[in-house]
Amino acid sequence: MNPRKPHVDWDSLFGDDYDYFDLPDLTPELSGIEASSMVELGGFQPGSRLLDAPCGHGRHANVLASRGFRVVGVDRDERFLEMARDESGKMGVEVDYRHVDLREMSFEEEFDAAVSWYSSFGYFDDETDRDILRRYRRALRPGGRFLLDMHSPYRHIPSVLANHDMHVDVLRRGQDLAVDIQELDAEASRYYAEKITIRDGKVERARYSVRMFTAPEILEWFRTAGFSHARVMNETGGPFTVSSRRLVVLGTA
């Protein structure tokens, strides 16, 4: 059994190097496309009160607000929230941004819809993640829907098998590099990863881990969290298969 415990170096993983390496690819065009996917996959209706948790720097929340949703965005990172507020002001939209850790969400039947996008679930131990899922459920009004987007557990397995039990992503910005090395603990169904950035000759390391789910397992989690119904799909709303890039779950309160 892998003795390592779930852990995330939050400040290092989502600090200045994140802005430098990752943000350029998260374009307004991509955010708009993903927001449209959320609405379509979730069957969300404009005018609905929607929870975006975690909302990060607001790239989806602001777009959804511009399309008529009443959005509350929560995140643990105050720096991201300030970025989100600045962008909402530039866009002329109103979003209620709040500094809240997922583990401390205490909403009670306040929302028609909730979203967790961009592989933002599964960073804690199972007991904590199950509690977070129950918090999403309690935040929804009867009939409300929660849309959860995650990596498919099968996505990296061919790479892991071919590359000495590791999956490696490399991102280059000029002469600078970000290398993401992921090792899969099959018994725990969890990736343990290290992101190494080399920028202006300076090396930084950030470690994190994230839980992987099969379809039956995540559906069982939704059931025990109190959702009346849940189903899985791929990133386009089609059947989830071993070749799907994403595992998307839609749960109904």
Image (spheres, rainbow, N blue to C red):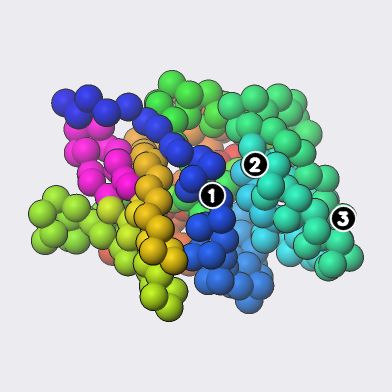
Q: Which mark is residue 14?
A: 1
On the image, which quarter does residue 172 sit in? bottom left
Predominant SS of the magenta segment: strand
Q: Percent x, y for residue 101? A: 63, 32
Q: CA distance from mark 3 to mark 2?
A: 19 Å
Q: Which mark is residue 133?
A: none
Span shown in magenta: 182-194
User: In this orientation, does residue 37 appear?
Assistant: no
**On the picture, is 236 further left or further right than 29?**
left
Amino acid carrying label 2: it is Asp
Residue bearing mark 3: 94
Q: SS at mark 3?
A: loop
State which mark lies toward you, 3 or 1: 1
Identify which residue, 44 or 135, lies in the foreground: 135
- Mark 3 / mark 1, whichever is N-terminal: 1
- Label 2: few (<14), some or many (≥20) within 10 Å? many
Which residue is outermost to the top?
Answer: 127
Q: CA distance from mark 3 to mark 1?
A: 25 Å
Which residue is painted at 45% across and 39% down in the image? Answer: 9
